[in-house]
Image: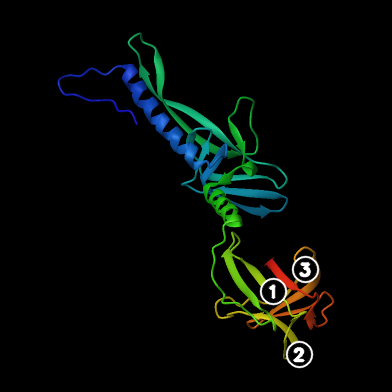
């Protein structure tokens, strides 16, 4: 940021000097605004607006302490109440007020201070700088959306210690991971890999059900019934798939046919399974 250098000894101050100071500050704020907007044209630094229904109307209450970035400027939001029809949109409108009258050397009176802020309004006039409230997000909302988008391609892994229970599996593995979502819910990913070459893979029966694998329910107690497609192959070049149900219950994942009936063996002379499920 540029600086206006001050010296002792009767340094004069000119209008250009004041303009230099003001321009430097404006440039610094512009840079900050650009970063805070996260690519948005306008953004609320915090949202001071709450709404309540009142018959066919909506009452907007604006509390003190709200700020909005419109373009490259930060504006405080004027507190107060606004009542409009429930179907009517509202707008953040930039208001400019000049005050502090001073007399120039040529006896001209001018107002040398300008206060700029934003107020909530149900209407706007031609020439107004305004933003429709419904079109403006908050910094918090944008951050959460950005994090959620990042999380969609980046898995925060936590091993649920899943273990295959398939019989006659020469090699295999099972991983379960989950990650936080914006809504606070968790999405579980299951990666199942198994291979056998003895003619078929047997799914063992446990308490009358066919158990595919186990997992540590103390870390994440996944539960519910989910539809999935298991991939298998008669040989490495001819993959097939079968519709199944995966039932998660008390640390066990049971597999059944799409109709819910038990599956005793996975079809195929040479069985190869590699699936990633999202539940």
What numbered label is drawn on residue 195? Answer: 1
Q: Position of residue 43 (x, y in %)?
A: 55, 42
At horizontal 83% and vertical 81% (from top left) the residue drawn is 261
Between 261 and 44, the residue placed more toward the observer is 261
At horizontal 65% and vertical 69% (from top left) the residue drawn is 190
Left or right of 238 on screen, residue 178:
left
Residue farthest toward the right in the current orientation of the protein: 259
Closer to viewer: mark 1 or mark 3? 3
Q: Are marks 1 and 3 in contact (CB under 8 Å)?
A: no
Element under label 2?
loop
Give the quadrant of residue 182.
bottom right
Alpha-carbon distance for marks 1 and 3? 11 Å
Residue farthest toward the top in the current orientation of the protein: 106
Q: Position of residue 199 (x, y in %)?
A: 77, 79
Between 36 and 130, the residue placed more toward the observer is 36
Closer to viewer: mark 2 or mark 3? 3
* Residue 75 in view, yes or no: no
Element under label 1?
strand
Q: Of the residues under marks 1 and 3, which one precedes in the sequence?
A: 1
Closer to viewer: mark 2 or mark 1? 1
* Residue 250 in view, yes or no: yes
Q: Where does label 3 land, which residue?
A: 235
Residue farthest toward the bottom in the current orientation of the protein: 207
Alpha-carbon distance for marks 2 and 1? 24 Å
Give the quadrant of residue 107.
top left
At label 2, counting other C-alpha atoms closer than 10 Å, the crowd grade (few under 14, some 14-19, many 20 or more) is few
Q: Where does label 2 land, which residue?
A: 208
Q: Are marks 2 and 3 in contact (CB under 8 Å)?
A: no
């Amino acid at each position: 940021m540029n600086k206006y250098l001050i010296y002792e000894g009767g340094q004069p101050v000119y209008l250009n000097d004041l303009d230099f100071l003001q321009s430097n500050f404006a440039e610094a704020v512009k840079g900050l605004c650009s970063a805070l907007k996260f690519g948005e044209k306008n953004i609320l630094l915090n949202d001071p607006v709450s709404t309540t229904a009142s018959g066919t109307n909506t009452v907007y209450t604006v509390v003190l302490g709200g700020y909005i970035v419109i373009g490259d400027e930060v504006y405080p939001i004027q507190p107060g109440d606004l009542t409009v029809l429930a179907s009517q949109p509202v707008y953040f409108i930039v208001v400019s007020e000049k005050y502090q009258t001073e007399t120039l050397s040529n006896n001209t009176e001018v107002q040398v201070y300008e206060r700029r802020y934003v107020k909530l309004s149900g209407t706007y006039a031609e020439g107004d700088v305004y933003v429709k409230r419904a079109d403006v997000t908050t910094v918090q909302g944008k951050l959460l959306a950005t994090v959620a988008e990042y999380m969609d391609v980046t898995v925060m892994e936590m091993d649920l210690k899943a273990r295959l229970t398939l019989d006659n599996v020469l090699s295999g593995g099972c991983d379960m991971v989950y990650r936080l979502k914006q809504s606070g819910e968790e999405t579980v990913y299951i990666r199942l890999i198994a291979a056998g070459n003895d003619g078929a893979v047997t799914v063992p029966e446990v308490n009358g059900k066919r158990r595919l694998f186990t997992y540590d329910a103390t870390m994440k107690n996944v539960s519910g019934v989910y539809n999935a497609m298991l991939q298998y192959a008669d040989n490495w070049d001819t993959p097939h798939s079968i519709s199944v149900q995966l039932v998660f219950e008390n640390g066990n994942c049971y597999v059944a046919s799409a109709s819910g009936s038990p599956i005793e063996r996975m079809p195929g002379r040479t069985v190869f399974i590699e699936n990633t499920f999202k539940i």
